[in-house]
Amino acid sequence: MKRYISIIAILLITLLCNSCSVWKAERQYRVKKLQRAEELLTFQPQYADSLGRKSGIVSNMDRYRPIRIVIFNKEPKEIKSYFLAPGQWLRSYLIGGDYEAVAYYENREVSRWEFEVKPDTHSYMGNEVHWYLVYSNGY
């Protein structure tokens, strides 16, 4: 009888020790899973360069005319200027704020935009960007 009791006691101790390590491993797994879920919730890609400038796209969707696009800040001071061939687009970076852009064809103003660069992202031509300018003559 003592032999059965000692065998049962050894089995119970072994079972408790193994279940403790299983519970501990399961608890660690759950903690890691929750930490990973929290990281995914707090991670929001910014699509910015190392200086904190937000990415955007400048696009000339006119099929026939080359366009020069100039971006100004609100002072007005010229920030960037692009010469785009028909159908060409470029990725560019700007810091957050309010801007104005003007499109020229043969030194004549053909379009004007006001836009804001902010943390929100948009999908343009399969690219996640914070802002975009598109010139199209409507052909």
Image: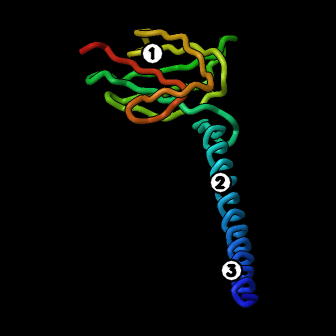
Total numbered badges shown on the rendered structure: 3
Rendered image: mark on residue 27: none
Q: Nearer the viewer, mark 1 or mark 3?
A: 3
Kindly report the distance in space between the C-alpha atoms of the residues bearing marks 1 and 2: 55 Å
Q: Is residue 55 left or right of residue 17?
A: left
Q: Residue at x 31, y 14 (%)?
A: 137
Q: Is residue 42 above or below residue 21?
A: above
Residue position marked by numbered label 1 in the rendering: 103
At which x and y percent is residue 132? 48, 24
* Visual colour scheme: rainbow
Q: Nearer the viewer, mark 1 or mark 2?
A: 2
At which x and y percent is residue 121? 53, 28
Residue position marked by numbered label 3 in the rendering: 11
Neighbour tally class for label 1: few under 14, some 14-19, many 20 plus, Cα within 10 Å: many
Secondary element at tag 3: helix
Q: Is residue 124 left or right of residue 115?
A: left
Q: Amino acid at mark 2?
A: Arg
Q: Amino acid at mark 1?
A: Ala
Residue position marked by numbered label 2 in the rendering: 30
State the residue lying farthest toward the bottom. 3
Q: Nearer the viewer, residue 20 or 70?
A: 20
Secondary element at tag 2: helix
Q: Is residue 98 above or below residue 26?
A: above
Q: Amino acid at mark 3?
A: Leu
At which x and y percent is residue 92? 54, 33
